[in-house]
Image (tube, grey):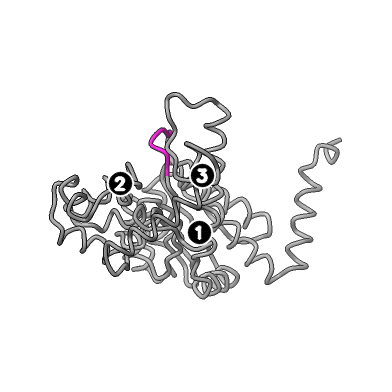
Amino acid sequence: MTLGIQSSIENSVASFTPTMRRVADVIRANPSIVLDQTISELAASCGTSVASVVRFCRALGLTGYAQLRMSLATELGREAQFGPGMTLGAEIAKSDTLQEVASKVARLEIMAIEETVSSLDFAAVERIVTALDKAQRILLFGVGASHFVAQDLHHKLFRIGRNVFVMADSHEAWSAALLAPPNTVAIGFSHSGATPDTVRYLEIAGQAGALTVAITGSPNSPLADAADEILATHARESHLRAGAMVSRIAQLSIVDCLFLGVARLSYDESIEALQRTRDITHPTAIS
């Protein structure tokens, strides 16, 4: 599955000019408007000019409005197979039943995983996995929901004997980054790519000589600018959310790829470590 045009819009919003962001907001709220309106009508609906709509299309890597219409028509047609109101990009509605809510969330999360993995830069993944395998120290940091994703990677790498640390607050993260020994890998998690504390953490780590990695939904963000390597997630969040939901799942798919990549390089040792830690934490192991 290749990256959808709606997800491309979501990922590019942070880098748009205010004028192009108005176009993005109108399309995000109602994607079918592109199919129903001419470029002049859409420009009027967005309170902008035809030239701005063309610039918006080209910022997405499209040749123009005709290609935008074709891409959205194809994508919306594919999503319509799930039934009325149940497209992959459908927003959670007040009138939805619990079953409809669960179905929409499941489809959003499935799409986030598929689009994230299918568009991964696997050359970058390979470099990061190799660096993690050889690292003297691995530092992980994220704020809010991204902190829980960092914790998940910490838990997995720790279980196979890696020297990995996840920091609980920014001062701790900055101190760890500043004192990073040689051969350190520092990974920062932020869906927006604009979380100030996480950006500062990667900047400090980079200045200290660590290999810095950004896991973010915004490849043109301050966090990405501070990183040596970037792994991009792709997710369409629901407006009705408490913290990240779909973006968290996309980040976790990258976490699993990194963990399995590292474990694969020391396959037998990793299997043994996982078995031993599983045995010692199993309830029957406690007399």
Q: Nearer the viewer, residue 136 or 116?
A: 116
CA distance for labels 3 and 2: 37 Å
The three-letter amino acid code for the residue at tag 3 is Phe
- Decide which of tag 3 and tag 1 comes sooner along the chain: 1
In the image, taking residue 197 as reference, residue 85 lies left or right, namely: right
Residue 82's place in the image compared with 166, above or below, is above
- Decide which of tag 1 and tag 2 comes sooner along the chain: 2
Q: Which residue is mark 2?
A: 33
Q: Nearer the viewer, residue 202 or 23?
A: 23
At horizontal 41% and vertical 33% (from top left) the residue drawn is 240
Q: Secondary structure at mark 2?
A: helix
Marks 1 & 2, CB-CB < 8 Å contact: no
Is 189 contained in the magenta span? no
Q: Nearer the viewer, residue 244 or 62?
A: 62
The three-letter amino acid code for the residue at tag 2 is Ile
Q: Position of residue 233 (x, y in %)?
A: 46, 57
In the image, taking residue 260 as reference, residue 66 lies left or right, namely: left
CA distance for labels 1 and 2: 26 Å
Q: Quadrant of residue 74?
A: bottom left
Q: Which residue is mark 1?
A: 116
At horizontal 40% and vertical 51% (from top left) the residue drawn is 191
